[in-house]
Image (spheres, rainbow, N blue to C red):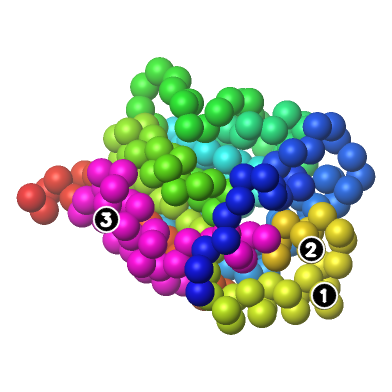
């Protein structure tokens, strides 16, 4: 099936100009979806060994949305005794306002409004994350974002996103018809399924962005992950 991406047909959360009950409800729904359908688990499975080293970590999360993945990461870091500081970046000020409210009690997370395609701030990060963002972008910007993730880390980079298929579309349609029925969540989730990159497409984008020595795998619930550990890669030269 062909990817359907039109800039003139955006997800509603991407064009929200102010905090509304609809946007707040949508972001709470997305956190629930991410928790139920594997987004949190996927990130924690990859980063678990990094956290287990208990060495101080500077983490960058590009396109953080409601900040639920940084919160899940901080919770795990606390459990294992790993000092962590997360800079969570997003373009949308209303989304960041909600993320900050939901992150009360998480001083390890600092939110910043910025264009994640151009973001740069001082030293390189130990970990760069980008979760469920690429399907919001056209191919050119997706490559730019993948390149930025590679450039901003001195340690590891982890990219996760949806994996396009007819079965995924059917599953998302069913979930938003039966459980997550809010108008914004239904619209954006179904559109995301159409915009997601297939497994071969994402691999080609990573190579075009200059990634090498990386891992790429399918994950449950129609997800996929790109992982690059620079130190391990360079040791294997």
Task: Return the residue found at the far right.
Answer: 21
- Residue 66's x, y, as percent? 70, 44
Task: Return the residue found at the far left.
Answer: 237
Along the line of sight, which residue is nearer the eye, 161 or 200? 200
- Residue 167's x, y, as percent? 58, 81
- Residue 140's x, y, as percent? 42, 43
Lower sequence index among marks 2 and 1: 1
Residue depicted at x 67% and y 60%? 191
Along the line of sight, which residue is nearer the eye, 189 or 28? 189
Relative to 35, say whether 114 is above or below.
above
Q: Secondary structure at mark 1?
A: helix
Q: Does residue 189 appear anywhere in the picture? A: yes
Lower sequence index among marks 3 and 2: 2
Label drawn at residue 214:
3
Along the line of sight, which residue is nearer the eye, 135 or 107? 135
Label 3 and label 1: CA atoms lie apart by: 37 Å
Dots 2, 1 in contact, CB < 8 A: yes
Residue depicted at x 58% and y 25%? 114
| Residue identifier under label 2 | 186
Q: Quadrant of residue 18?
A: top right
| Residue identifier under label 1 | 177
Q: Which residues are magenta?
A: 191-219
Residue depicted at x 80% and y 32%? 17
Q: Secondary structure at mark 3?
A: loop
Q: Neighbour class for label 3 at 10 Å: few (<14), some, many (≥20)?
A: some
Q: Neighbour class for label 1 at 10 Å: few (<14), some, many (≥20)?
A: few
């Amino acid at each position: 099936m062909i990817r359907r991406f039109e800039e003139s047909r955006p997800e509603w959360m991407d064009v929200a100009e102010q905090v509304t009950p609809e946007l707040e409800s949508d972001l709470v729904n997305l956190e629930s979806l991410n928790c139920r359908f594997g987004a949190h688990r996927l990130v924690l499975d990859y980063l678990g060994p990094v956290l287990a080293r208990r060495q101080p970590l500077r983490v960058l999360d590009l396109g953080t949305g409601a900040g639920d993945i940084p919160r899940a990461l901080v919770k795990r870091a606390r459990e294992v005794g790993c000092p962590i500081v997360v800079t969570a970046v997003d373009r949308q000020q209303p989304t960041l306002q909600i993320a900050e409210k939901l992150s009360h009690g998480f001083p390890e997370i600092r939110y910043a409004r910025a264009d994640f395609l151009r973001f740069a701030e001082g030293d390189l990060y130990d970990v760069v994350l980008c979760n469920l963002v690429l399907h919001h972008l056209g191919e050119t910007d997706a490559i730019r974002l993948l390149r930025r993730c590679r450039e901003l880390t001195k340690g590891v980079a982890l990219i996760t996103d949806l994996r396009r298929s007819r079965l995924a579309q059917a599953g998302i349609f069913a979930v938003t018809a039966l459980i997550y029925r809010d108008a914004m969540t239904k619209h954006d989730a179904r559109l995301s399924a159409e915009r997601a990159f297939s497994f071969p497409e994402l691999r080609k984008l990573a190579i075009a962005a200059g990634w090498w020595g990386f891992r790429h795998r399918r994950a449950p619930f129609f997800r996929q992950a790109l992982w690059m550990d620079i130190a391990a890669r360079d040791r294997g030269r």
